[in-house]
Amino acid sequence: MNAEDKTHAQAAAKDFHAAYGAKYPKAVAKVVDDLDELLAFYDFPAEHWVHLRTTNPIESTFATVRHRTKVTKGPGSRAAGLAMAFKLIRSAQARWRAVNAPHLVALVRAGAVFTNGKRLERPDDLAA
């Protein structure tokens, strides 16, 4: 996950499999079988990797909601729960960290191709 590029990360995964595959086959299979998804962040700008490597934004967002619903012993109704979650997430949004290199978000949305964090000017050359 912290390798400098996708090639080094794949090599580290092979080393991980060799070192722990015999002793912990199920745990190693979880990592190795989903390796493409685990390393998908290498296909985005390097500036965004810090945001893509973590699930903290999701976890911390819902931790606020979970904490509040425990304190109030539940939301009461489904509509009240949705309203409370919406308001809590909306207020927490003001404290969120901004995305690094926001100008690259438009490129990603437009379909620009990135390899190992760097934009490929000519994606056709990748296949060659």
Image (spheres, rainbow, N blue to C red):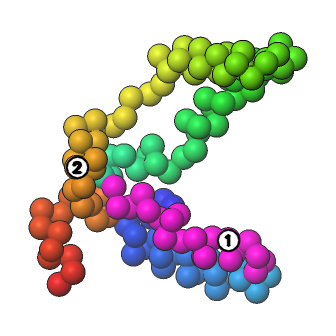
Report the amino acid beneath label 1. Answer: Lys
Left or right: 92 with respect to 75?
Answer: left
Name the residue at the right extreme. Answer: 73
Residue at point 42%, 73% (across, down):
8
Q: Nearer the viewer, residue 76 or 58?
A: 76
Residue at point 64%, 81% (across, down):
17
Q: Secondary structure at mark 2?
A: loop
Q: Which residues are magenta?
A: 24-44
Figure quadrant of residue 102? top left
Q: Is residue 36 visible?
A: yes
| CA neighbours of label 1 inside 10 A, class few (<14), some (14 to 19), many (20+) | few
Reading the image, the residue beneath label 2 is: 110
Q: Nearer the viewer, residue 89 or 19?
A: 89
Residue at point 37%, 35% (across, down):
99
79 drawn magenta:
no
Return the mark for residue 30.
1
Task: Return the x and y of residue 31 as percentages of the image width and height.
Answer: 63, 70
How many marks overall?
Answer: 2
Q: Is residue 38 above or below residue 22?
A: above
Mark closer to the chain start, 2 or 1? 1
Name the residue at the left extreme. Answer: 122
